[in-house]
Image: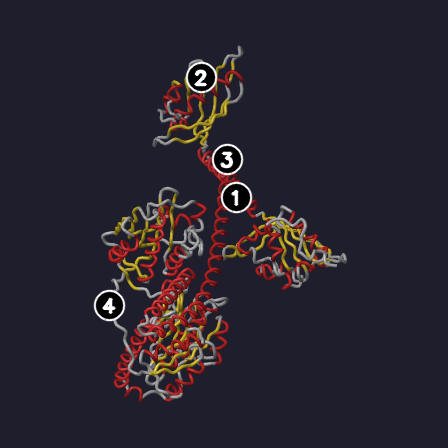
Amino acid sequence: MPFLNEDHGCPGWKGEMAGRIKAFEWSQTELGPIEAWSRALATAVQLLLASPLPLVMLWGRQGYMIYNDAYASFAGGRHPYLLGSPVELGWPEVASFNRNVLDTCLAGGTLTYRDKVLVLLRNGRPEEVWMDLYYSPVPGDDGAPAGVLAVVVETTGRILSERHREAAEVAFRATDERLQLALNTGAVLGTWVWDVATDTVTGDERFARTFCVDVEAAARGLPREIANDVVHPDDRERLERMATETLVTRQPLNAEYRIRRPDGSYGWVQANGRCEFDEKGAPRRYPGVLIDIHERKIAEEALRHLTGTLEQRVADAVAARAAAEAQLRQAQKMEAIGSLTGGVAHDFNNVLQVISGNLQMLATSAGNDAATQRRLSAATDAVQRGARLASQLLAFARRQPLSPAVVNPARLLAGMKEMLHRVLGETVAVETHSDAASWNVLVDRNQLENALLNLAINARDAMHGDGTLTLTATNVVISAETEADHACCRESGELPRGDYLRFSVSDTGAGMAPEVLEHAFEPFFTTKPDGRGTGLGLSMVFGFVKQSGGHTAIESELGRGTTVCLYFPRCDEEETPEAADTGGVPLGAHETVLVVEDDADVRIAAVELLAELGYEVLKAADGDEAARLIESGTPIDLLFTDVVMPGEVKSAELARRAAAHTPPIPVLFTSGYTRDVIFHQGKLDRGVTLLNKPYRRDDLARKIRAALDRGAQAGSETRAEADRTAGASQMQSPARAAGGRSILLVEDETDSREAMHDLLTILGLECTAVASAEEALAVVAREEFDALLSDMSLPGMSGAELARQVRRTRPGMRVLLVSGYGNSAEIGEPIPGVRMLAKPVDFAVLQSELTGLTDGA
């Protein structure tokens, strides 16, 4: 009989985890739907949720994880992904340990561990964690063990505290031992005798040196005031009081105080003595010894300081860890939203392209009908608004293709000032400031202008259209001394030290409350009324700056306005001149364009637009069909292809075949979402031309014409080069002429391996890709390759060791190593003949390094 009601009622289940457990799709696991759970399982879950201790239940042979709120806090960044997951998948680094737990407890046994140390992955790296663990079986309805209940109490803080304390005690004992040794080997600073009746002090030679007095005078006797003058002023009154009390109580003197050394510094000493009394009980003679205890006092002070700050340091470490986990959760959330929005933008842009293409053709055929043209214009404006929304989604998701150029900030702000005056209105005063010699930055100029414009419009709205907007471009050096002055460093530590150009946009508006500021960069978050904003402005800015290698920071206070800062790395290159707008819409001269598009509606719209522009058009629904057309010998002047393509032949392979065609066929890519071989590290690959969807007729005409012109220029250069090297090509060896050159690629990260494989294929190489050095050695042993391209960081054997072995067995093979540290990478002993490339690998650099393999030389 199922224990739960038809309405999924779970009496007694309270807390966040109760809601997550109820909402989880248990029907996809061996536990079955929650309404069909057994009484034993449901009762165990109820007890688990009611406990304040971290509890997790592993149900069934697979150990499906069900846990309470306290355990969720322990799980950190893995929550809520652990819920409903088999324990060996949820904690793979301790899979064998958990399998033993399941086997033991499901057989009826129990397990207890005190201060058990396990190595768990925390914040992306292995970390030793100590825990008290208690495992016991949970019976099913039939009384047999059906699951395991685990009590998890982390003791890492206590263990580390005890270790610190023990280390401090060891240090103290060592210091004390040194002190005792010193006392026995010359740490005594002298002996003295106080004549109470005459109030004079006599001492030996060491006493005289310690108090800086004449030896003979010390032997004869000195007024006690002379000795007291060397005592630290803060200790004199206490020393005098202690000495007087011993005369009354007849107890020994044991006084610690400071005396002035010959160099003017003060050192700690200890005076030990006991007064002798005459037959009448009057104090007569007071002998004693003076001992150097300076090292011991310093050690005691260090121990007191360590003990006093240990608790605070532990609390600070716990707080720092909690902050790091919060940042990780935020990053995971933003990444998940980014993937979702990027996919939505892709499909949305395809739909918009169909609408846009048909609207433009309708506008041409409608003639001078004013009413029809007005309606078409309104529809076209709506398409453009949709395109801007999709662009903002891609910007936030960091999936928009950037075309970076070297920009001078001062000239950029000066050029924007007039536009800002028009957009913001006359009641908003616009001020721009920049350093006299502001550093250049490498960014997409159009996207940067859009980002600053977005911030300016937000500022205008915050000031209700009346106030002062200030834009500044400032050189900033972030170092150990200055990083605390920058909000982005103080809050997240994400910005490395170095030189940056900071754009600041400040307003005199109402400012933001802390709870609003916390969500300012999240997509779709807005404080504006319904219909007044999408909530994508700041998130678009955030995504663009991140994608450009920079950082965004925001400071705001109610009643004091808001300042948004954009930090970009300094660029030492010369400013890129802006391309002039030639104007006009170039038409075709009956060139043949092959359109490759899997979406039928988009394909039809593109074909009709190109035909209207004066081109002959061929069409293909996928890469396979397009490849057949190219190889058939049909005259083709340009390949116009979507990036994401079904079929065996992908767009990158199709472009490679077009480039290998005689004569080469130029390629123009189009896409609404470019996360593929033409788009790496947020930038278009060098030499790649892209037309974003949805595109206008005029944009299509200019891109097509430019691609054809570049193709014609490249073709003439290729023919000239072929004429110059005709004799050399005739000398080419038969083996080399018979087939292409081969390269072995070694990369353990799947996406990077696939992207680099496609790039090498585009360069005309036969590429074999493997994921480890061990696989590479096995392949090299049975096959011949012209070159090896390997990442430095690999699982198991490193790329450097792989290079050494390959150079020993295949001395003629060209070897390239790739590392994020470039030439600074640690490879041990130099490897002759091996070249180091920096990540990310520049397309032109890679092509240059492979010269002789990619050009048939």
- Residue farthest along the top direction in this orientation: 280
Dots 3, 4 in contact, CB < 8 A: no
Disc 4: which residue: 580
Residue 591 appears in the figure: yes
Task: Please give left or right for residue 103 compared with residue 843 in the image.
Answer: right
On the image, the x and y values in percent for residue 265 come to 36, 32
At label 1, the amino acid type is His
Does dot 3 land on a helix, a strand or a loop?
Answer: helix
The correct choice, above or below, for 422 with respect to 663 in the image is: above
At label 3, the amino acid type is Gln
Residue nearer the viewer, 738 or 380: 380
Q: Nearer the viewer, mark 3 or mark 1?
A: 1
Find the distance from the CA under tag 3 to the CA under tag 4: 86 Å
Q: Nearer the viewer, mark 2 or mark 4?
A: 4
Find the distance from the CA under tag 3 to the CA under tag 1: 24 Å
Task: Name the image quarter holding the C terminus.
Answer: bottom left
Q: Nearer the viewer, mark 1 or mark 2?
A: 1
Q: Residues within 10 Å of mark 4 (few under 14, many from 20)?
A: few
Find the distance from the CA under tag 4 to the CA under tag 1: 68 Å
On the image, the x and y values in percent for residue 581 come to 25, 68
Task: Name the image quarter holding the N terminus.
Answer: bottom right
Disc 2: which residue: 195
Find the distance from the CA under tag 2 to the CA under tag 4: 104 Å
At label 4, the amino acid type is Ala
- Mark 1 / mark 2, whichever is N-terminal: 1
